[in-house]
Structures are given as C-alpha cells and as structure tokens.
Amino acid sequence: MGNTNALTEEQRTHFLEHGWVHLSGAIPEKNIQRYIQDIWIRTGYDPLDSGTWTEERFRMPRHKEMLWKEFAPKGYAAICDILGGEDCLDHTIFNKARDGLIANFGKEEYRDMVIHPKDLENWHIDGNWFTHFLDSSEHSLLVICLFNDVEPRAGGTYICEDGLKPIIQWLHNRPQGCSPKLVDPDGTTALDALQHCEKFIECTGKAGDMFICHGFMPHSASKNHRRIPRFITSPRFVLKDPFNYNRENPEDYSLLELKTLKELGVSSLPDWNITGQRARFKSDNNIERDSRLPLELERLKAHASKTGGIVDSIHVNGIVEYNEWTEAALLRAQ
C-alpha cells in the first residue's frame, strides 16, 4: 500500500484537497491515434458536414484493446498510486483499455444557450452493476480519458468537487448498502445535495490527458454548445478487496482511503462495518452500445476493401463477446 511515487507531491496534495487530479499526457499520442483513427468510418459521419451528425451523444462498442500499462503507462501508474499499488487491482476484470468511445456531437440549438452545471440533467455516480457501500472495491475511481482536445463549452464532462463529501457521508450512514442510484425508500437521493454545491469543474484538456477522480465524485455529461466533436472513455478499475478504513499502520492507507477519511473528518473507522450483502449483477445499459457493433464492423470492412487496408478490430473474424461478466466475476463480490 501507500505511495508508489507515480504522482508528484503536489499532485498527491491536490487529490487529497480536491478529490481529483488532471494528468497531462497520460496516454501516448500513438495510442490515442490508433484508437481514434477510424472514428469517422465507425460513425458513418462526415467530419466536415455537421448535418450528418444525427445523434447528439452515444456510446460506441470496442474494437481495440490493450493492457493498461501498455496503453497508458503514465496514467496507469498514477491510478495504481492513488489506489495503493498495482497489486491491489483485480486484474481479472476490466484490465484492458478499450476504444469504446463516448461521443458528444451536440446540437445546433445549444450554441447560444447558457446552462449552469447544476442544471444539467445527468448528474450521477458510476456503478450500475453492484450494490453500493462506502468500501466497495468496484467503486475505486472515476477516470475520464480525453481522446481529442476538449475545449470549454464543447461537451466536456462536469464534476462536482464539493458534492463528494455528501456522497461519502451518505454511504457512511448506510452500512446496509444502497442501489446504484443512491435512493432511499422515501425517494430521497444523495444527489439532492448537489443543489447546494458550488464547485463545478469542466473536464477540458488535450488529447491524451486524464482526469482521475475519487470514485464517489458526482459527474454529468454536458451540452456541446460549440459542436466540436468530443470523444472520451470512462474506464473501470476494480480492487481485489474492499477498501480498508481501519488499518493498523496509518502509512498503509491508500491515497483514496485517506481522502475518504478526510471527508468524514476522522483518521480511521474502527467501528464501521457493512450490514448488507455485497452483490454484482449484469446491467442492461450496454444493449444500445453493443447494438452498434455489426454496423460499425460492416463499415470498417467495406472501407478496408475499398482502400486495401486492414480492419483493426478484435471482431474481424467474428464478434467477440465481453468476458468480464462470467459467473466467477459476478460472484466474486459476495
């Protein structure tokens, strides 16, 4: 556990204070280019004609994948640093970087709109595939990878920095666990607290940058007012074991554990334990994304046939199913 020296002291201090860090050049340019080079073939859109951009925002299936330490050595090292070291990660699930890009093309009607971040309609916490606890191993980080330059008002993800504390407190007060939407039986939700928040950060930067945030960081898609196509991914990282907020040696706390304890105003949680059942389950949120795969593959093959190129896809010889949702992976949390 502890510091693996990938982050500078300034970056570590920033994460402890703000719950996020902007890491420049986290992904090598050659890997960005490989993952983005066929984006217009896959979408079927004309990059020079916004009239062909018929959908505002959508998730794309994956065609390419690389182990994280090969795809983003700098970014992966920082992620491991925050989580307490590479050995803490569960390498049997979500262990590869994929080109399942999240596209945001915006709409013409947004150009002159001014929308306050708290009025965005998509504020949420990631994790629609497990029961949420304060110490959930699935709830490690919110990571946003930029695959093109993202300018202000051009669809960058918003995070709510001062929304982190109430989310952490909400989960601390519910050791029985709660649903992914963080809603009580009476309809009260943890996200109600965002109406009183003021620290909203727009995740803008250069292609290859990463925003690495505490896993409980509230965030929302934004409107792409400028209609500059924006492509990101938001990958998952899962730990082998739940977070530990009662370590014998304080130096053994990970940076993320320290931030959680800091928001609770304590140095440890000796008497806190979950009282509910951990569970993982398949989400149906990926149905629309995966339905795009046959048409994308058809377009890639047609383009390769026309140009004499190759199809850079793991599906070139037939659609490859995702392998994370094995029975073992689903049961590992229980």
Image: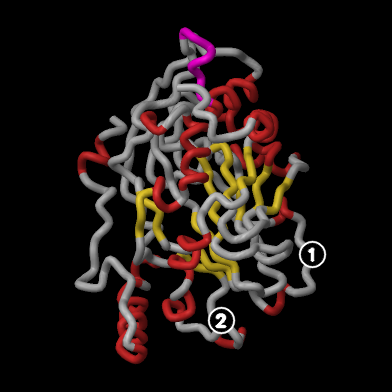
In this view, 48 is above or below 208: below
Q: Position of residue 329 (x, y in %)?
A: 26, 41
Task: Please tell me in which quadrant of the rendered image residue 321 appears.
Answer: bottom left
Q: Decide: marks 2, 1 in contact (CB < 8 A)?
A: no
Would you say 188 lies left or right of 317 here?
right
Q: Is residue 176 visible?
A: yes
In this view, 229 is above or below 24: below
For label 2, the residue is 53
Numbered disc 1: secondary structure:
loop
Quarter in which the N terminus is drawn: top left
Q: Is residue 287 visible?
A: no
Front residue (pair 210, 139): 210
State which mark lies toward you, 2 or 1.
2
Q: Position of residue 37 (x, y in %)?
A: 47, 73
Amino acid under label 1? Answer: Val
Residue at screen point 47% across, 43% down: 76
Q: Residues within 10 Å of mark 1 (few under 14, many from 20)?
A: few
Would you say 64 lies left or right of 162 here?
left
Q: Position of residue 176 (x, y in %)?
A: 43, 25
- Residue 114's label in the rendered image is 1
Q: Which residues are magenta?
A: 248-254
Quarter in which the C terminus is drawn: top left
Amino acid under label 2? Answer: Trp
- Residue 213's label in the rendered image is none
Residue at screen point 79% across, 64% down: 114
